[in-house]
Amino acid sequence: MPAVLLVEDDATLGEQVRGHLLGMGLEVVWWTRGHTIDPAMPPPVDLVVLDLMLPGRSGFEVLADLRKGSDVPVLVLSARDGTADKVEALRLGADDFMTKPFWPEELVERVRARLRRPVLQRSDRVELGDLAIDFERREVWVSDDRLHLAPAEYGILEALARRPGAAVTRRWLVANVLDPDREGNERTLDVHVSRLRRKLGKGFVETVWGIGYRLAGKRVAT
Amino acid sequence: MAVVAGLVALPQVIGLVWWDGVSRHQAAEAVLTGLLERVLAEPDAAEACAASPDAWTRRMDAPRGPRHHRPPGDRPPPGPPRGPQVRPPTLEVHAIDAVPAALAGVPEDAVAAFGSPFSAEVAVATRTGWGGACEVAVVRGSTAPGFLGSVLPASPLWVAPMVLVATVMWLAVGPPVRRLRALTENVRTGRHPVSMDGSDEISELSRAFDAASGALRAEVHAREEREAALRDFVANTTHDVRIPLTVLRGHLVALESGSDRAALEGAVREAHYIGTLLDDLAAEARMRDVQPAGAVDLGAVVERVVARHAPIARRSFVELVHAVPADPLTVDADMTLVEQAVSNLVYNAIRHNRAGGHVAVVLEAQTGAFTLEVLDDGPGVEPEALARLTERGFVGPGSRNRDSAGEGLGLHIVARVASRHGWSFHLENRDDGGLLARLSGAFRNPQDLHG
């Protein structure tokens, strides 16, 4: 179970955030003030949710201490709207920030994104439900059946699978996947996507309104 | 200045008069002492005096100063004498106990002189040692003009050059002093312009005062304008915040009296709206100051903004989607302002859409420039209102700017942020319906980015 260190001095907000994190199935350690962190022994957590204005050591100091001995993702919560705070937090090594007020769903989504990102960055194989793609070998399986895709079809699938869930524009796919001399227009792209969909089956390649396509499905990154 | 001139000249005149008086006294004393010694040295002087003290006198000629010396035989012309008469010295004798108070304390065998330097009277007394009425012999004389030892001319005309110098000084210094006084008065009363004609130092000074005062007035004016604008702005946005707050209260009361799904969703929407109004307020205040630009990852900005508005889009049954390049797309910008601009575009597109509608946010890198598009399939905007959407306070027909968030601030802020960063901001109705808003400008790392 991933663990999160929550550093928030406001009792009500802290209790709410803790509840949301617990609801995500995370283990939560809650500090209500800024403590000194020994660089040799950083807290053994997978994510830090850090308020900036704290009694004891400030959020900036906690962040600076933490970064001396850990590269755990840090999501900063700030009630101040000034750019300087955010820039300083990012400079000190924060990965992301949220400005109060925020919706619980926003927090949940950002925490989830932070917990998942490092895994994605180092994977060269992606599994999405029945779909598995090996980027190194350029091989694609659906339910253990290997598919034979045309180069353009594989190129489109790889572009989408590199960032599962993220929409990719049709313009980008045309410019970067299709051969500009032979098939470089959006209509050709749609034809390739249509063929790819037939081969993969329903539910994988989704059309994204106003943008292009994305790869959906339950992701199992390895 | 006149007072200073007087203060300088007066001690000089007093000093000269005092010096003249002392010098005359000393000369008169020397002459009178000589006369006295000569008389007392005569062989039968003691006897003559003792015989008749009251009648014992000696004829004495008045000593004359240089200007009174005339060659022998040169007599003054007949007629009334001109100038003060020179009185010849007189000899008197007194018993020791009858010495006038003014001459008391005459030492034995010594000669003492009496008289103030500022007085014309001079007396020299000595003890004769003859006793009785002849014990003290006194010679009285005068330092009248013409007497020996004078320093200053007899005529008071010697004062004239000094008066002349003082007058010339006053004439020379007076006008500049009067101009200085006028300048001081102008500055004190805040008269504008304070500058004075001429090419002297005072005119230069006045022009410098004028320039400084002009700059100060411009600053004060600009400050007053800013304050007035801020007052208006606060008044208007206070009004804007009160509306959703009132609606929110209504929803909360409805919730209190029972489970009302519509009231709950309404409350959530109003709370979100109040939050965006506050963000606009902060952005508007921030826009008034020059903030240093820093490196801002536009992709991260889009993701944050989409995450912020996703909950409200979901509740409005509007699908909110986005696409950003995989690699950071960095621009030089004020992060808070840029985030607010993108946020306003996205929120605007959600608010003015319908249930089942879509909003897409697309960030792309093209040759040397980024484009950030926010498109929706809402009702769009009447063509005649399109160009005015970015005006502050413009509330379009059908109210694309909040349901008339009074100020119509959202798109106005976007336009100002774009202009401030040297980006272009464009709004158009899409062919398929709905609105397309596009921000574009230069970015830092214009290499080929991966989507």
Image: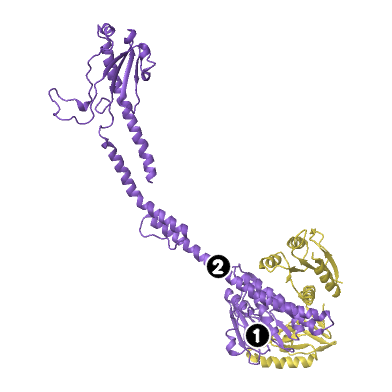
Kindly report the distance in space between the C-alpha atoms of the residues bearing marks 1 and 2.
32 Å
SS for callout 1: loop
Q: Which mark is residue B6?
A: none
Q: Of tags 1 and 2, which is closer to the observer?
A: 2
For chain A, what colour was chosen? yellow
Q: Which chain is purple?
A: B
Residue B294, can we see it?
yes
Kind of residue at disc 2: Glu
Q: Position of residue B361 (x, y in %)?
A: 68, 82
Q: Is residue A188 above or below residue A165?
A: below
Mark 1 sits on what residue? B400
In depth, the one of B419 and A215 nearer the eye is B419
Q: Earlier in the sequence, mark 1 or mark 2?
A: 2
Task: Indicate the quadrant containing the N terminus of chain A: top left, top right, bottom left or bottom right.
Answer: bottom right
Image location of residue A108, percent across then percent down: 80, 75
In the figure, A7 relative to B57: above or below?
below
